[in-house]
Amino acid sequence: MELKTKIHAEDGRPDLLITREFDLPVQLLFKAYEDAELFEQWMNTKVVKLESRKHGSWAFETSNAEGQVVFKANGTIHDFVPDKKIVRTFEIENAPFDVQLEFLDFERLTDDTSKLTIHSIYRSAALRDQMLKLPFNQGLNMAHNRLQDIVNKLK
């Protein structure tokens, strides 16, 4: 089955491009990224902090069935334009990955459809390639599928 979330990574480059079209108005797609309660639902993670504004910051953590935290990530929001874009850093704590810079662009396609483009930049092509060895694409696709299903109920 073809994944709806597409990841394009050119050999030798330290970046990747993620794209996904949603059957959601751009305002609802953006809300899924700015609203902590919605974000927790579709990402299946706890939002420790989400300051949805320019110069804000964020922190997420995921626990296993026993309640042990198994994943922590955080960053700074450098730019925030409602329904248009978010520019942020993304850092996974206690992992061999360096901080990455992400440009999230939200595009209105029609009144009922929109497109998300994420341009992620890593310190090196080697670090980017290391990230791509994880089940990154499948996990992101599953999360975006949940986003579509959960936010669709808000229409």
Image (tube, grey):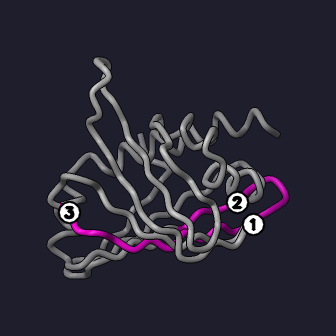
Near mark 1 (Cα within 10 A), the count class, few <14, some 14-19 or many ≥20, is some
| In the image, residue 122 lies in the stretch drawn in magenta | no
Residue at the spot 45% in from the left edge and 39% down from the top edge = 142
Q: Quadrant of residue 145?
A: top right
Residue position marked by numbered label 3 in the rendering = 97
- Residue 18 drawn above or below residue 125: above
Q: Quadrant of residue 130?
A: bottom left
Element type where label 1 sits in the image: strand
Magenta-drawn segment: 97-117
Judge by depth and name the residue closer to the eye, 3 or 120. Answer: 120
Residue at the spot 80% in from the left edge and 53% down from the top edge = 112
Describe residue 61's horizontal placement relative to residue 94 as left or right. right
Amino acid type of the residue tagged 2 in the rendering: Ser
Residue lying farthest top? 66
| In the image, residue 103 lies in the stretch drawn in magenta | yes
Amino acid type of the residue tagged 3 in the rendering: Phe
Describe residue 15's horizontal placement relative to residue 129 as left or right. right
Residue position marked by numbered label 1 in the rendering = 108
Residue position marked by numbered label 2 in the rendering = 114
